[in-house]
Image: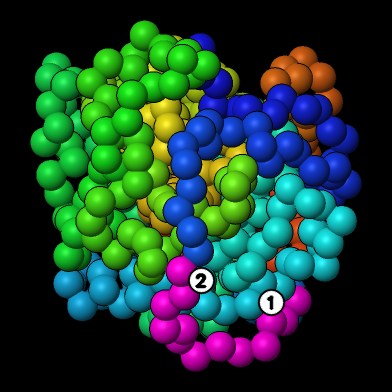
Amino acid sequence: MHSFVTAAVVLTSACNIIAAPAGASNSLLSRSPQEESEPCESEAPTPYPPPKGTGACENPRVRKEWRALTDVEKKDYIDAVLCLQHQPAITKEQFANNSDLNPINRYDDFHAVHNLQTPNIHFVGHFASWHRYMMHEYERTLRDVCGYKGSQPYWNWSLDAQPNNNLSVAIYDTDVFSPTVGFGGNGKYVELPEEVEGPFRAWGRSGGGCVQDGPFTVPNFHVNIGEKNGSSCLRRDFLPAVLHEDADPKQVQLVLDQPNYTKFARQLEGGPSFAIPAIHAGGHFGVGGMLGQAGDAANSPGEPLFYMHHTMIDYVFWKWQQKDLENRLTDIGGPVHYLDFGGENVTLDFQIDLGAIAPPITLREALNTEGELFCYTYE
């Protein structure tokens, strides 16, 4: 069974981590050579973001679903993502002694930190909050470094799910996968290598190779982290059956109906394989399948749709909080360590971090999207 968490190493702190093996991935295809494209304006790398404010959020940015953006807004966002690949990495010192991780640019910064912390940020009580922090810092970097004026959009896959027609590829026939106003389509079809075990929900896969169209093809975009032979193309391996089943609005509602955070978090994330439908797995495996980066736990940020998917996960988290905001701004729970249900639980004072990208914060700070640290809402 293909497990989403490829490195099930249990460590004691999100701040105190030995490298998760970057090679423990489903990256099995040949690599494309790195090619240079015209860089956008660069600026000197800086460490942590500017100090957080000390006042309450008064004018929150509004995050919108991709299809609610104008074509100009979509282009601005994609241009900003591509711009990150031409800005020098700020995490090089952090990974100086890690030969498996060699961030080159600002896009790689986020990929490398996620790769490193993978064993500590999945199937734990701080899964939703850690990824919320990551989305916030990614949005901030797009704005501060690449001049993006908007907010981080999300991809609401539940709008397109047809669970009773789960081999339909119509779920990919939207602006999200448009080659002109979206992220491009599937990869070229590649047979599964013998060493890759195909799970029972892998029927209907139709890709696995390099993305064929859209803005994230070589030489415009390269995946530099977690690739055995250096820089690679972005790979996709659409699995419509997984996406239809996991993106089912009924699955979303099941998450939203949970009475407390601990139950919410377990329903949100599901299990460490995609044998059982779960909305978190759906966005990963529905795009990355067996051979694409999105289906690789540590290296899924190599896929630009990772940020759209995880902002949707944050939207579900936000929506669940809104149902009882007063109590759910302090409702937290779940294990400190990977799948250690029944062990030590996280608390409001538990700290999460993004390595050299951003300073540690507490879960108390991360729970409020309109507090002192975060200032955004959803449409």
**What residue does disc 2 label?**
85
* Residue 81 percent coordinates (x, y): 43, 69
* Residue 350 percent coordinates (x, y): 80, 45
Taking the image as shown, residue 160 lies to the left or right of residue 325, namely left
Residue 31 lies, with reference to residue 245, above or below; the image says below
Q: Which residues are magenta?
A: 35-47
Towards the viewer: 171 or 136: 171
Taking the image as shown, residue 33 lies to the left or right of residue 201, namely right
* Residue 30 percent coordinates (x, y): 47, 41
* Secondary structure at numbered mark 2: loop
Q: Quadrant of residue 205?
A: top left
* Disc number placed over residue 49 in the picture, else none: 1
Tell me the quadrant of the picture where the C terminus can be found: bottom left
* Secondary structure at numbered mark 1: loop
Towards the viewer: 215 or 201: 215
Q: Quadrant of residue 69?
A: bottom left
- The colour scheme used to paint the residues is rainbow
Residue 104 lies, with reference to residue 330, above or below; the image says below
Whether residues under marks 2 and 1 lie with C-beta atoms below 8 angstroms apart, the answer is no
Towards the viewer: 226 or 190: 190
| Residue pictured at 23% horizontal, 21% vertical | 204
